[in-house]
Image (tube, rainbow, N blue to C red):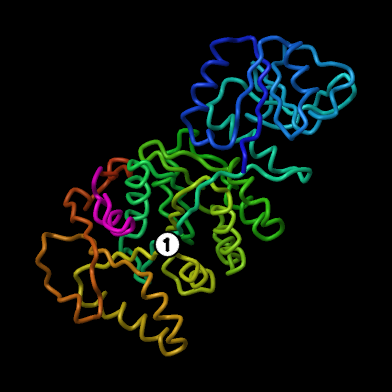
Amino acid sequence: MAQVPLLLMEKDVYFGEKLAAYLRTSEFADRLALHWHTSEQEGWRWIEEMKSPFIAVVHESIPLPEPLPEACRAQLWLLCESERGSSTAGTAGTAGADGQPLRILAKYQPLNRLLSSLIAGYNDTETHAPIRGTRYAATTVVYSPIGGSGKTVTAVHTAAQLTAAGERVLLLCFERLPSRVWYTSASEQGQGDADTFSKLLYYAKTRPAKIAAQLEQLKLRHVQGRFDYIPPLTYAQEWDELGAAEVQALLAGAADSGVYDHVIVDADSADTPAAAALLEAADHILWPVADDCIQLQKITEWFDARRAVDAQKTEQLRRNVIFIHNRAMGSQTVNTFSDYSIIVRGRLPYVPEWKALGRADVQLLRGFADEAVAALRGGKR
């Protein structure tokens, strides 16, 4: 879709120039077009002349006309020097001169959060088409039916590696007992809201069309990896409520946002309808496998069991699988993977220092997932 106009009425030249420069080079560039006015007369004239939907952000020092122009009632934000006792964005308890409630936008917050709040608010209304990006997201599920196989390490490193290569990545964790330290210790906003996953699951159940808008508001940025992610579930019972329909809605919402090139999913090992839905929806299944005869035999039996139920669906799933040799120590292996019908397309190196760790962030190693990413990108690094 075309860019949505974003009007900024702000006399602070430093802030206006900073926002303009950031918007030109950020992931929001294809969705928002900034129109910055330091003159309030020019700004209100611009609003009166606009015929298409837009977002208006007006600094709190600028007087509001009475009544407010009809065109900006739904999408008028008051840019405040303080948060007015609210979160970084929300509906204020105050109103304009005509009694219209005003949305509050804290001026001093990360610009990506500021712009995400504006887009989320815009998309949450029903009066116009939502703001979408122009990207198409491929879904990669990191899966193994065997616990402790290295799924989370693989998912996080793959997301970080793709981001370093210039891709836009969203990481979702669907584990019942997530490796939370990978996420909660690595957010630039702290640990985030403990109910974040709950909110997203609620929308998946009740208003799936609004998931893309909620992602704008709920996503966090991983400090080391620089990819976006949603904090994992907090309440174990939520995992029991996660069915195939909710999985499909969450993945569709992430893809429909048009913001991402890749959605990476850290899947649970349990054999559930939700796991089956994840695997069926995946464009790629990144499957870490160790040089271990017991693990290799279990993988063979996993495929045999599914083939006995639905051979055609199992073969389609198998074609999407990319086996990655985890904890690889050189090119030589004890087991011959092909004896188990496993063709390895990349390696994740064995790292002796990972035998004992006190912090997860020191485990993020540049280049660790090179071969996994090359396999996903068809040989390109």
Q: In which quarter of the image is residue 152?
A: bottom left
Q: What stretch is highlighted in magenta?
A: 366-381
Picture coordinates of residue 157 (x, y %)? 32, 49
Q: Which residue is drawn at 79% across and 43% down?
A: 127
Left/right of residue 280 with respect to residue 298 in the rendered view:
right
The magenta stretch spans residue 161: no
- Image x and y of residue 156, in percent: 36, 50
* Furthest residue in direction bottom, as rendered: 308
* Residue 196, above or below 9: below
Question: Is 131 on the left-hand or right-hand side of 339?
Answer: right
Horizontal and vertical percent for residue 18? 51, 18
Q: How crowded is mark 1: few (under 14 residues within 10 Å), some or many (20 or more)?
A: many
Q: Position of residue 348 (x, y in %)?
A: 23, 57
Quickly name the residue at label 1: 141
Residue 174 as seen in the image, left or right of residue 35: left
Q: In this view, does 341 lie to the left or right of 10?
A: left
Quadrant in the rendering for residue 107: top right
Q: In which quarter of the image is the N terminus?
A: top right
Residue depicted at x 25% and y 51%: 370
Q: What's the residue type where badge 1 is placed?
A: Val
